[in-house]
Image (tube, rainbow, N blue to C red):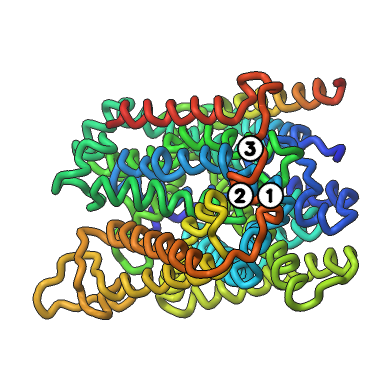
Amino acid sequence: MDSNAINLTLIDYSILAVYILVVIGIGFALRRNMKTADDFFLSGKSIPVWVTGLAFLSANLGAQEVIGMAASGAKYGIMTSHFYWVGAIPAMIFLAIFMMPFYYGSKARSVPEYLKLRFDEKTRGLNAIAFALMTVASSGASLHALAALMHLLLKWDYNVSLIASSVVVLAYVLKGGLSSAIYTEVLQFFLIVLGFAPLVIIGLNDLGGWTGMMSKLPETYAHSWKYMGTTANPMGVEWFAMVFGLGFVLSFGYWCTDFLVVQRAMAARNMGDARRTPIIGAIPKMIFPIIVIVPGMIALALTSKTGSTYHIPNGITGETDFNLVIPSLIAHYLPTGMLGLALTALMASFMSGMAGNVTAFNTVWTYDIYQSYIAPGKSDSHYMWMGKFATVAGIVISIGFAYVAKNVNNIMDFLQLVFGFVNAPVFATFLLGMFWKRATGHGAFFGLLAGTLAAVAFHGLSSPSILAAGETIPWIKGAWLGAHFSFTSSMAQNFWLAIVAWTVCFLFTILVSVATARTKTDEELKGLVYSLTAKIREENEPVWMRPAVVGGLVLVAAVILNIIFW
Amino acid sequence: MNFDLRFPIGILFTTYGLILAGYGILTSGSAIYQKSLGTNINLIWGGVLIAFGLVMWIFAILGRRK
């Protein structure tokens, strides 16, 4: 690890200090705008569309995403782009064109609140509680990853990094609420792009350009689809699981229903801007593989370049740790100065990932749990106070989760597994809710439960690899009820789990809905269900502003990218 | 809301550009640039950041006039 230890100088520290000053400054500048609870939680629906669009993309661009996608680039090459061109773009366009009218038009303040308006209280409660737990846990995971990485790279004290970054996030979220989090996400977006671009430029130069890099990588790394159906496929996922599992169930489940991202679009000024938000996010998302996947490929190619001393470092366990691809490339190529900028970008994305989770948590806690079940009918200033309290509490719980992640082996894998079970079926509920007026509250609630149980059962019955006789795997990987279904990778197992959970939820929701009486009249469902809502007229808008037109163009561009890198 | 994010973006990146370019001039020809294949990446990228920051300033000022 010593060859990758990084020494920062005064210049690098001053770059980090400038960032912290600016984000706290933004928080204080926004403080005067925080007059009502809606200003704090929803930004008073006043944020310009280019900002909500970049924040929509950036809320998902946490450091774990950047680090994980680079790791995946080193392991699988161009195939990783499926997480962008298949696993994100179509869902973002679908949200913009078909779903945003109901989120924004229903006047719901959160995604769980939409479920309450469309279905009933218990469906909202289930979704809100699962979501609140999930956000504080992932905020804790982000915090732990930041402190662990800084300890590894810079020898900073774990506790000091943890507390210092929490205090920075607390300061700006407490002062400026959702607006602070959104504005900071946009800063982070530019920092990631401008901090990592030199890495890609220098790396490609070093390897003799794109063709030079490709000549040092296995042939499978150059294609996204060509090797999908063959045994040479490094991901071990066949095309159906890729398209239906990742491209439909998981991707639509995340981009179209996760309040963390949808909240950004709901902060837009008007319906048109809310619908354009995901499309504006989708445009940079399409070319983001250059910034996050290509560094992984550069790193792997560099290991076989003659005369290069670079190697992908070992992690704490002593094995090659692909998650260290980005930090080790930064250390390899960037001198003092640029080094500070790239590390600041990395830290900024950890912190803004945490802030995003905390702002989604305080809204769902205050509106969907506290106001609904604990203390309804209080004054606006009371809920604003509760929001600030929830911000502090959310950060304190995140710190707790970070220490749990540090000390309890596998706990984060376990939580991720549980959230996977809860999340996998959820898009079926929204799809039926928005497009089938006959879907009932009982149908939605029991459909979700059935889908989650199906996910648990599938995990128990399946294994991520073909087991030899007598071979066992840790229960966290599956097969605790016996390996009845075997896959060629844990990614394939995971995609199929999502497909099964979604299908069970979809069918069960229909069955229970047909068997139970409708509790909401057509009148009550106006604005919540497609067939009962007046179509949005966009003839008055210029062609290049219409979501359907621009969204269609983005989809065509994504198809072209898939063909180029086939 | 009378808050224009383009100002803070402009401030942040012109500051970064000035720090990097200034440091790049001071360290020009130094051995630290062996890492970046002999190019003074601080000076070059500092210039890019200054240009980006200034574009944000210009947009912000034009936006205020409207």
Left or right of residue A30, residue A262 in this image:
left
Q: Are marks 2 and 1 in contact (CB under 8 Å)?
A: yes
Looking at the image, which residue is at 27% across and 48% down?
A240
Label 3 secondary element? helix
List x then y, in percent, for residue A263: 66, 51
List x then y, in percent, for residue A44: 81, 48
Numbered tag placed on residue A526 in the rendering? 1
* Nearer to the camera, A157 or A292: A292
Q: Chain of mark 3?
A: A
Looking at the image, which residue is at 76% across and 78% down?
A374
Label 1 secondary element? loop
C-alpha separation, residue under disc 3 versus residue under disc 1: 19 Å
Position of the C terminus of chain A, as image quadrant, is: top left
- Residue beneath disc 2: A529
Neighbour class for label 3 at 10 Å: few (<14), some, many (≥20)?
Answer: many
Sequence-first disc among 3 and 1: 3
C-alpha separation, residue under disc 2 versus residue under disc 1: 6 Å
Q: Is residue A449 visible?
A: yes
Left or right of residue A239, residue A434 in this image:
right
Tell me which amino acid carries mark 1: Lys
C-alpha separation, residue under disc 2 versus residue under disc 3: 17 Å
Q: Is residue A184 visible?
A: no
